[in-house]
Image (cartoon, helix red, strand yellow):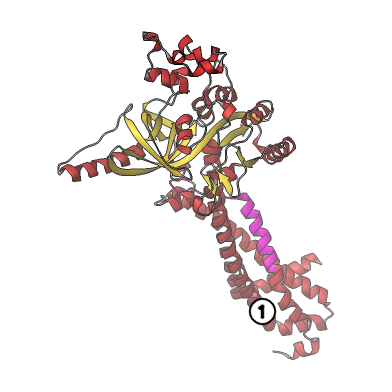
Amino acid sequence: MISVLFRISSRNLLEHRAKTIILGILISLGVLVLIVGNSIMDTATLGIKKAFIDNYTGHVMITGIARGDISIFGVQSPGRMESTPIVPDYRSVLEYLEGNPEVDKITAQATTFGVLGMEEIEVRVFTLLFGIEPESYHAMFDNITILDGGYLKPGEEGILVSRQRLDELEKELSKTLTRQKEEEVVIKYKVGDPVRIISFGNMGYKIREVPIRGIFEFKNISEGVGANMISYVDIQTLRSLLGLSLSFEGEIDLDEGETALLSIEDEGDLFSSDSFTVEETESSEFTREKLEGILGEKSEAVESPGEGASAADAAAVYTGIETGSWQYILLTLKHPRNLGRFITSLNLWFKTQGIPARAGDWEAAAGPFATTADVLRTVFNIAILIVGIVALIIMMNTLVLSVIERTSEIGTMRALGARKGFVWRMFLLETLIIVFVFWIAGVALSGLTLLILHLLALPATNPFLLILFAGEALKPQLSVLSVFSSALIVMVLGIIAHTYPVSMALKIQPIRAIQVE
């Protein structure tokens, strides 16, 4: 029976070549758009995912709780009025992560926006400031190449600036000074030169001046839109810009003169003139160095951890974790495929411990950059849905015309004893043959198109295309999932499209159908 149906269906398709080709072209074009479009979307999603995990976010981000969504760029709230919370109970969270066998590497970070400039010159170059713990951060994200100077050292005050940021700052400063002095002035920064950082936020404007410790470029600039906007600063500088608590690890040595008041037993003696008499000796001299030593501002006060110290140990030594003044804990997993389960268990642990913290994946950490591909995919799928509806209507109309033309044939078959089920299966098989043959043609055409696009490597000429292409050039890879999903979609559309025409055919009375020429 199947062989008979196949022969009849094949003969009918060959006899109605024009309509078969029309339907086939429509199906092949639909498959082409579906596979090529989804392949580009998948390439963009995978590219963005790899870029952020390897360079900025790791697999998991831990933050405090806020009303808006939190990413490594801050709280995504209207007007950006909500400040990014610090990680609560930092020490407990860190100890728990250290003891978790699934965790590979750990680091901590704080972020703010700011501008770079020079004293008394109205030039401002925008930058995104990442406050980091150098050793653990560099161990997790080895994403930059130092062109001049060196990487930040533990406890060292300073900033790492990208070559592009510095070029822009030098260009703007040179222009401004040239206008003021009416002669050409060239500004060139070098390692060790001070640069002024101005931060703005809920705490108002904060200004700090720090030395340039290194000039860098990203190893693969295509791995992040606006990556050159990022500057890395020591965490103490960033804390002061954000108005967070500064931290200090180590002991403060006070001489006998500085501790004399602590030995007074009678409160009345505390206010006597003798209590404030200080012998003028060289050791009692109050210097800037002593002040910095007491306040913990000198980088030499922080000792380096020993050999073999873990990333988390490094963070504990260099950051003064008792203050908890970190906005993010970032970590990578030994087995990323367990990411969903790990985040669920971590959030459950926060809840049971009463810690108001939250764990999220790389997409949450990447914020608006990660959702870009999702938005594009949603828009693309809506467009595909509209095209699919139009294609369904065209297919249905074409099949209706085919049924009308074959009215006498259907009537003769019915008069000779063909049951409704036989006629239904015949039209269904015809539809499936058309779908299958031209689906294969569409897949082949899609593969050829993707190969041509890959070889052409169309350049990304703006930030939007840089996101869409997941790099500086469009090099899409064939999405296997799209190939199979396209087969399912066109099959379903074909079955739906043939339903109405076949129901019309089955309503035709054999006697009347035979009388139709």
Q: Quick check: 441 above or below 319?
A: below
For label 1, the crowd category at 10 Å Cα-Cα, with few meaning under 14, some 14 to 19 and many 20 or more, is some
Left or right side of 95 for 464: left
Q: Residue at x 67, y 67 (%)?
A: 493
The percent coordinates of residue 162 (x first, y second) are 38, 36
Q: Which quadrant holds residue 231? A: top left
Instruction: Please state which amino acid type lies under the numbered disc 1.
Output: Ser
* Residue 375 seen by the camera: yes
Report whether 199 appears left or right of 322. Answer: left
Location of the N terminus by quadrant is bottom right
Residue furthest left in the image: 183
Residue 377 magenta-highlighted: no
User: Observer-nearest residue: 54 or 457?
Assistant: 54
Most foreground residue, 517 or 74: 74
In the rendered picture of this protein, how many numbered marks are placed on residues?
1
Q: Position of residue 121 (x, y in %)?
A: 27, 41
Q: Report the predominant secondary structure element of the magenta stretch.
A: helix
Q: Quadrant of the C terminus?
A: bottom right
Image quadrant in which you'd find residue 167: top left
Please give the range of residues in magenta. Answer: 471-494
Can residue 55 be seen here? no
Element under label 1? helix
Where does the image place residue 43, in percent across and percent down from the top left?
54, 48
Magenta span includes 477: yes
Q: Nearer the viewer, residue 234 or 450?
A: 234
Q: Say if 325 sits above or below 122 in the image.
A: above
Residue at 80% over, 86% down: 510
Q: Is residue 414 above or below residue 88?
A: below
- x and y, in percent, of residue 183 in the image: 15, 42
According to the picture, the residue beneath numbered tag 1 turns out to be 402
Judged left or right of residue 344, residue 78 is left
